[in-house]
Image (spheres, helix red, strand yellow):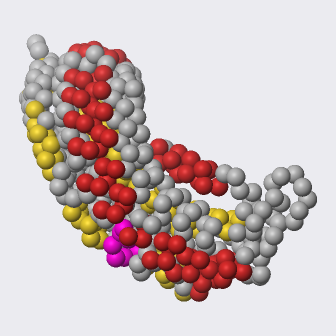
Amino acid sequence: MLRALLLLLATAATLSGHAAAGTGSGDGDDKPTPLCSPADRAALLGFKAGITVDTTSILTTWAGDDCCGGGWEGVACDAATGRVVSLRLESQPGRHMNGTISPSLGGLEFLESLVIRDMGRIGGAVPDAISRLTRLQQLYLEGNALAGGVPGKVLSKMSSLRYLSLAGNRLEGPLPPELGGVRGLEQINLAGNRLTGAIPSSYGNLSSLAYLDLSGNLLSGVVPEFVGRFKSLALLDLSNNSFSGEMPASLGDLRHLADLSLSRNKITGRIPPQIGNLLGSLSSLALDDNLLVGPIPKSLFGLQKLWRLDLSKNMLTGALPDLDGGGSLKCLDVSRNAIGGQIPSSISKLHGLERLDISRNRIGGVIPATMAAMASLEWLDLSRNAIVGRIPDNFSRMAGVRHASFRGNKLCGQIPQAPPFNRFPAAAYAHNLCLCGKPLPPCRKIS
């Protein structure tokens, strides 16, 4: 949702002040819309010539002399000047374009928005000629097959650039330090490529960043302390890389940060308690599949807007903290750690929780009967711990649970004999001490 909103804002900002082709100048007079510039028409036809296959049928509309008022799909012009200000080509599922991005697009000197998205088979390098697009604010060339490196020297000449996405291509090599010189950038998305190396120190100059997604690459090094300078940052996604070192405490300075993901890296050390400073903004925190140690900071459960917390697949220890807050949580996953202690009865205060996974830890004690008050729960996994006692009878009140697992504990006694708990597969209760009742064999009667 956040990504879609940012894209919507980017598009609105880019096209504000321009009337659509064929609607007049927008000042209330009856002046006809001028024909498109011959130079712009030639630049567009140059792009068309570089496409060898077009199953989207978009380019079949590019015919006739007028690329502004002639129904050229994806082309928008300034109604007063007839100059092309936006080129937006987006594919539908199962449709694609084969070919390359022609250098001729560099001739669209009034272009403010260039979007070529999800064409799948447009390859080759990003042409150097687009450095001539000095008015360009929005550049989205994502979901294609572009190769080579991120063209830092080209992008550094585009001083008006605010929104950049080259995600989902085949780009490789290091992050270009030159990109740190484009100080107006508000969005960088280079996810889903084959980029390597560390984040350049020059990126610390990008003080306007609101969105940074470098996920799904081969990046390494540390998460730099300078990320704390990005005071407008709403999304930071560095997941699926090889980042190491500790989480910088400066992340707690990002008071507008809503989405933070460092999943599937090699990050070590403790979770900085300063993350709890983001109490008015953070909605999703994913730190799973790293090498984090130490206890879970209690401050995380004071985050007022947090709905997703994933700390699974680390080496966290200590007990689950008393859950005084966390009322917005819908998903809590702390599975596959070394957490001990017992389940706090205060977990029942997470009244909106839909998914709870504390499996594969060292949690003991009994299951609190207060958990039956968690009316929104749909997924419950307490498996592979050291929990003792019985499954509380009042769990039958949790009628919305669709998946549950208690296997691999030290539980005993009768399983709650009401849906859904008496209808789960027997495997959900396997490897305990003496559980009985459906779906397991009946309990023995004591004479």
- The residue that appears at 19% across and 41% down in the rendered structure is 247
| Quarter occupied by residue 86 | bottom right
Give how far across and how far down residue 137 sits, in percent.
54, 58
User: Which residues lie in the magenta part?
Assistant: 145-152
* Residue 75 belongs to magenta span: no
**Mostly what secondary structure, the magenta segment?**
loop
Q: Height in image: 10 above or below 143?
A: above
- The residue that appears at 25% across and 36% down in the rendered structure is 250
Front residue (pair 296, 213): 213
Front residue (pair 94, 154): 154
- The residue that appears at 47% across and 43% down in the rendered structure is 2
Front residue (pair 10, 99): 10
Give how far across and how far down residue 300 sits, in percent.
26, 27
- The residue that appears at 38% across and 38% down in the rendered structure is 231
Question: Seen in the image, is 252 located left or right of residue 266?
Answer: right
| Quarter occupied by residue 148 | bottom left
For this orientation, the residue located farthest to the right is 30
Q: Is residue 338 visible?
A: yes
Give how far across and how far down residue 97 sits, in percent.
53, 78
Q: Height in image: 428 above or below 351?
A: below
| Number of marks in the rendered image | 0
Q: Height in image: 243 above or below 360?
A: below
Quadrant assignment for the C terminus: top left
Q: Is residue 412 visible?
A: no
| Quarter occupied by residue 73 | bottom right
Give how far across and how far down residue 127 sits, in percent.
45, 78
